[in-house]
Amino acid sequence: MGYGKRAVKQLKNYYEGKFVSLSEDQEECDEEDNGIEVVDDEGLLKENITPRKKVPTLLKRLSERRPEKLDYIGTSYGLTLELLRFWKKFSFVPVYLSQKENDLTGEHSCIMITPLSTDKTASDSWISAYFFDFRRRILKLLGKSFQSFTSSLALSIIHNPAASKSALAEKITLTAINTFFLPHDIQRLEAYSRNQVEYRLIVDLTTDLGMLYFQNKLDGIDTIQQAILLAIGLQNKSIDTVAEELNMPVNQILAKFYNAIKKLTKQIVDVMENKVEEELTSKEMKRDTAGMEPVKESLEDELTTAAKELEKKQKKELSRLKKENLSQYAIKGTEEEWGKALAANKSSIISVKREYPLN
């Protein structure tokens, strides 16, 4: 680890309270014997200048003093790709970038901060809000004040894991699509995705595609495709300029550009198709349930009522049967008569004497 990295790491650890601090008694003693005496202006005229017994040291160890309570620490420097990457390694987030170049160095002044709060959830929330606002403004200025930036520098500015890892961005919705694109615009993108038109016909749409992608509304393209989309769509650079900047042949740039537009177009079309499918399903459900009415009682109450009605019906049927004359269906004959009848022969016909004649 270099001296710069070591110094920044130690500074963050110090203000986050990771060094051993003095006890309260030692602090009070240091404050009393620090050799500093506050006097008013009138006392200065009568002061006797004599050597002090205890003069405070010019420098102290970090473990010998308690750190101030800070919410964040910041840095300001002339923007270069190397310095930007250095500060991003320590979770510093850009919040300001000067639109005017320095007259001496030709660099843009950049301010970056990193939170020191132990409550990571709270700190991530406010630092992410700062960064998202900063990123939105930078995206709009890439084609103006920052058009001279290389695509790698511009990508490094608007991509910052320290600010975006805690925030879940909403994916693109049909409302956003209708805001940015007309139906004919979608048709042009689909035609380009099918190789039916050349890229010049959809270059005007790459600005909106770039704004949506770099605000995390769309995803799915690699770093080279991101650089090409940013350079063409947001910085208004030509294909030849992008090819020279990325040191790639023009045909490879166009191939990468085509694949990126095809992936982004598919995501947009999928959202539109899913919305139409949801609306159709909703209409079918409303049509199927139009004649249905909700039950007035629960299933348990309905079963209880049905059981009571069945029991009442059974009692009524039993009472009716008791009142009827069932003696005509009775089988007569004593056991002795049945024994003689069964023993008389093996015929399948059995005769039993009846007490009353048949009608």
Image (cartoon, rainbow, N blue to C red):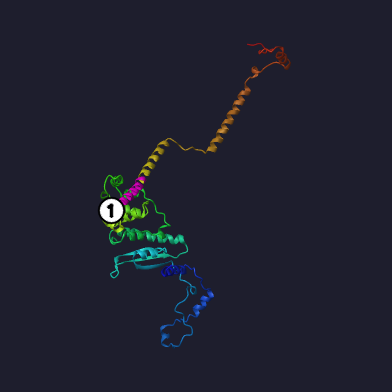
Task: Point out residue 300 in the picture as x, y percentages from the top left corner.
Answer: 55, 38
Task: Point out residue 334 in the picture as x, y percentages from the top left corner.
Answer: 72, 16
Question: Is 176 displayed left or right of 5 in the figure?
Answer: left
Task: Point out residue 354 in the picture as x, y percentages from the top left corner.
Answer: 68, 13
Q: Which quarter of the rendering shows the C terminus?
A: top right
**Image vertical order of residue 109 relative to residue 182, above or below:** below
**Image vertical order of residue 127 relative to residue 330, above or below:** below
Residue sitting nearer the eye, 306 or 59 = 59
**What range is drawn magenta here?**
251-270
The picture quadrant where one finds residue 303 is top right
The picture quadrant where one finds residue 152 is bottom left
**How many numbered discs sit on the rendered protein?**
1
- Tell me if residue 123 can be seen: yes
Location of mark 1 (residue)? 250
- Identified at 26% across, 55% down, the residue is 240
**Image vertical order of residue 20 relative to residue 307, above or below:** below
Q: Main secondary structure of the magenta part?
A: helix
Residue sitting nearer the eye, 171 or 291 = 171
Task: Point out residue 345 in the picture as x, y percentages from the top left corner.
Answer: 70, 12
Instruction: Specify the amino acid type for callout 1.
Output: Val
Q: Which quarter of the rendering shows the N terminus?
A: bottom left
